[in-house]
Amino acid sequence: MKKDCGRLIMASHSIGESQDIPARSLDALRTSDLLIFEEDRGARNALKAAGIHRDYLRYSEHDETQSLETLAETLRAGKTAVYMSDQGCPGLADPGRNLVRVAVAEKAEIRTIPGPSSLTAAIAVCPFDLGEFHFGGFPPRDQEAREKKLAGWANGGVPVVIMDTPYRLGALLDSCCKVFGVDHQATLALDLSGEAETILNGPLGRLVDETKTLGKLNFVLIVDAIRSKRSTNISLGPPFDARVNASRKPAMRSPRKSRRR
């Protein structure tokens, strides 16, 4: 008799407010045989939201080999594993892609639980046309390499979506001003779904000024396409359309959970 194939569930996390975690993701955490998380903090928040205390694997560059082997063994045994990235929908600028490759190699069933995504959330508050865009992801850290990459994206003729770590926002904006120009239109979405959520729409030069005192926040930057004749440079009133969501504070972290390595 053929052994039942295992199942890998790529489950969405929240991007700020824990109440946004999909109910199906919470059910998967309660019922799956193996739990895999990108980071400990995300694991603690998700497990607390699910109302459970369970061991889990942390999958990162430091735990990669053993985590992939454990996943393969779980799938071969016909069991179910669930993966959640640190924030949002897995597979976007996180290490979850390798888990999917293992599931494909093991001929396991693969399922997804869609949910919050910083990419789509930022697109929703962007005023210019995004019928087509380029997802640039994380640009190089080195300034020269970063600006060379930005220049290539600028010549693509479509808006560019860029992410990076919070402490490199200033350097990224400076490079964008140099490549695209200080008057070029952009949208900067900061701390989406979080306590300090702020949406800034305006020229890149003003984005630089407005972010100097905001602190280090997760962000998505969308830079409009370069066109010879612009028809979308509309006036939205004040230089920025900013929204701050001062909802309740994030839940306190639960005690550190034990990890199965």
Image (cartoon, helix red, strand yellow):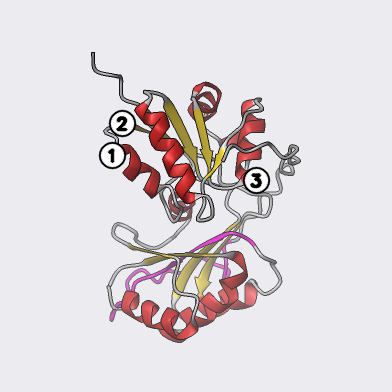
Residue at image position (56%, 41%) is 261
Q: Quadrant of residue 217?
A: bottom right
Tell which residue pokes out farthest to the top in this image. Answer: 1
**Quadrant that contains the N terminus:** top left
Which residue is labeled 1 in the image? Answer: 104
Q: Is 48 left or right of 120, judged from the image as shown?
A: right
Which SS does the magenta portion mostly show? loop
Numbered mark located on residue 41 in the image: 3
Number of marks in picture: 3
Q: Where residue 167 appears, x then y in whole percent?
A: 62, 69
Rate crowding at label 2 as few (under 14), some (14 to 19) or many (20 or more) other CA atoms within 10 Å: many
Depth check, front residue: 231 or 180: 180
Q: Amino acid at mark 3?
A: Arg
Lower position in the chain sequence, tag 1 or tag 3: 3
Q: Identify the secondary structure beneath mark 3.
A: helix
Instruction: Determine the CA span between mark 2 and mark 3.
Output: 28 Å
Q: Are marks 2 and 1 in contact (CB under 8 Å)?
A: yes
Alpha carbons under labels 2 and 1: distance apart: 6 Å
Mark 1–mark 3 Cα distance, whole angstroms, equals: 28 Å
Q: Is residue 186 above or below residue 192?
A: below
Q: Is residue 156 left or right of residue 206?
A: left
Q: Determine whether 197 is above or below 72 in the image.
A: below
Which one is nearer the viewer's eye here, 193 or 82? 82
Which residue range is magenta in the image? 217-241
Query: Would residue 228 appear left or right of 117 to someone viewing this image?
Result: left
Mark 2: amino acid: Ala
* Pointer 2 residue: 108
What residue is shown at x 39% (from left), y 63% (from top)? 128
Bin the neighbour count of mark 1 within 10 Å (Cα to Cα): few under 14, some 14-19, many 20 and up: few
Tags 2 and 3 touching, CB below 8 Å: no
Residue type at numbered disc 1: Val
